[in-house]
Image: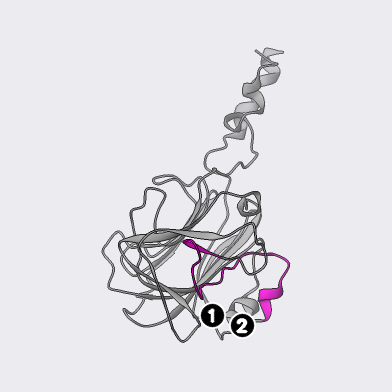
Amino acid sequence: LPNEAFWTSERATRESRPNALPLRIGADSNGASQFLGDIARPLIFGRALSADEIARLAKDDNGLTADAALVGDWQWDQAKDKTFAHTKAADLPAGFKGEVQVVDGPHGKAIRFTGKGWVEVADDARLALTKAYTLTAWVSPKALPGSGGRIIDKSTVGTSDNFLLDTHPGNSLRLITRQGTVGFDAKLPPDQWSHVAATFESTGEIRLYLNGKLVASTAAGHASDTPGSITALRPLLE
């Protein structure tokens, strides 16, 4: 019927409503596809950084840590009660499941993943990024299996209902968004550090960067799970 809630639901509108899953570093929403190796300085911005800004991060420029759009940045120096503090937001800590290790690296403290655990952050409105975002990290992977390993993930396994940056297949790079996917055969060298970054703009492009350089891009399409054309049926019922 015309006045039923269906017409304002996600199935009938173009409105993006991300899932309520925790954000995970090093694993997917089922705790599988675990990253093997080290991840340092994973950062999440609520805007798409420019190519110049990505290049700065790849040179260990810390100037962007004061950026107002930085929503994900945690202190890996030590874990207290199995949590890592956020650098700016005390109410947005990262916890860990299973076993992870904090190790020293050339880009500061890093998390070592051995397939026995991951880091996660509880769902929060600040992580509900639908218009634009940037995901970056320093990674030193092992030789990964064909399924690859998750770097930063807030999607339901098998869907594109949010964002994820991983190494699928193997030691490649891939960004999945609600509005498209882009991949690159990065051949990330095992046991060597590489800077990876991905940017998304809902009305622009989806991009992948490796060591500060753009390596792949595609235009963002319509959200894959919001078939707005169905709303055209409503006037016929009124």
Q: Is residue 62 above or below residue 22?
A: below
Residue 63 visible? The answer is yes
Residue 56's label in the rendered image is 2
**Sequence-wise first label, 1 or 2:** 2
Q: What is the secondary structure assignment of the residue under circle 1? A: loop
> Circle 2: is it few (<14), some (14-19), or many (20+) Cα within 10 Å?
some
Looking at the rendered image, the quarter that the C terminus falls into is top right
Indicate the quadrant where residue 199 lies: bottom right
User: As rendered, which of 85 and 115 lies closer to the eye?
Assistant: 85
> Circle 1: is it few (<14), some (14-19), or many (20+) Cα within 10 Å?
many
- In front: label 1 or label 2: 2
Residue 212's label in the rendered image is 1
**Would you say the residues marked 1 and 2 are in contact, meaning their CB atoms lie under 8 Å apart?**
yes
User: As rendered, which of 15 and 18 lies closer to the eye?
Assistant: 18
Report x, y in % for residue 169. 32, 62
Range shown magenta: 63-84
Measuring 27% from the left and 73% from the top, which residue is drawn there?
143
Q: What is the secondary structure assignment of the residue under circle 2? A: helix
Q: Furthest residue to the front?
A: 81
Measuring 50% from the left and 83% from the top, which residue is drawn there?
107
Looking at the rendered image, the quarter that the N terminus falls into is top right
Q: Magenta stretch: residue 65 in it?
A: yes
Measuring 67% from the left and 76% from the top, which residue is drawn there?
64
Residue type (three-letter) at the residue carrying disc 2: Arg
Q: Magenta stretch: residue 47 in it?
A: no
Residue type (three-letter) at the residue carrying disc 1: Gly
User: As rendered, which of 155 and 31 lies closer to the eye?
Assistant: 31
Report x, y in % for residue 12. 61, 29
Residue 153 visible? The answer is no
